[in-house]
Image: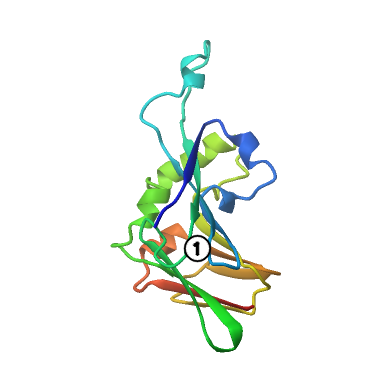
Amino acid sequence: MKSTLQRLCLLAPLALLLTGCDGDDAVSIRIRLREDGAGTLTSSGILIPADPSRVEAGTRGVDYENRVQMSAAIGRFTALSGVTVSDIGFSSGEGEGGFRFVKVTIPQGAAALWPDVFVPMDETARLKAAGALDPSGKSKDVGATIKIEIELPAPVIGNGVTGKVRGTKASVEGSTATLVVPVVAARGAPEPLVWHLTWQK
């Protein structure tokens, strides 16, 4: 599968980036699916960089106490089936009567890889990182969940989730479906979470 990626890395402080957004937006996967099955995928996550940013290095008279980096990437795919982000898998297809579907499989439990890819830190470090992104302390949920948002070519007809952990939220608005999964709860879940979406041509 061929893809074209554009990468953007943003260094803390990032309070401006989160203005007008909730904590779910820092760690996310966003998919825009076209009628022909191709589309775009945008992903974002947070991490604690080992070295100071250029902003830090160019600052005088300040002793920085905390550091966090947010990264984002956007790419294109020709078919959703076979797309994976870490070990989160995507597939799509068509059934009878013009009904189409998207299936998202999110591994959970100790063997799941995606939590450490998107939020490679423990809960104490995550809360500290959230403070660097928003010094007001209002965005403590930054990095606590992963949001997966899928925009379909037509209004969503079916939206179902199996293997949900406490705090999982699934919602639909027109042709856009959103799933929010708590990272800590997912680490302790016994089975994968599977999200099914359907729409009609």
- In depth, the one of 53 and 82 nearer the eye is 82
**Residue 130: horizontal and vertical position, in percent?**
52, 41
Return the residue at label 1: 181
Q: How is the image coloured?
A: rainbow
Q: Relative to 62, does residue 17 appear above or below in the rendering?
A: below
Task: Please name the amino acid that badge 1 sits on.
Answer: Val
Q: In the figure, is residue 109 to the left or right of 36? A: left
**Residue 55: horizontal and vertical position, in percent?**
51, 20
**Residue 173: horizontal and vertical position, in percent?**
70, 68
**Residue 194: horizontal and vertical position, in percent?**
45, 74
- In depth, the one of 42 and 69 nearer the eye is 42
- Tell which residue pokes out farthest to the top in this image: 60
Q: Residues within 10 Å of mark 1 (few under 14, many from 20)?
A: many
Does residue 88 show up? yes
Residue in view at x 42 percent, y 23 percent? 52
Q: Quadrant of the N terminus?
A: bottom left
- Tell which residue pokes out farthest to the bottom in this image: 96
Q: In the figure, is residue 185 to the left or right of 180? A: left
Residue in view at x 56 percent, y 78 percent? 100
Q: Quadrant of the C terminus?
A: bottom right
Q: Relative to 8, does residue 52 appear above or below in the rendering?
A: above
Residue in view at x 37 percent, y 69 percent? 189
Residue in view at x 37 percent, y 56 percent? 86
- Tell which residue pokes out farthest to the left in this image: 111
SS class, disc 1: strand
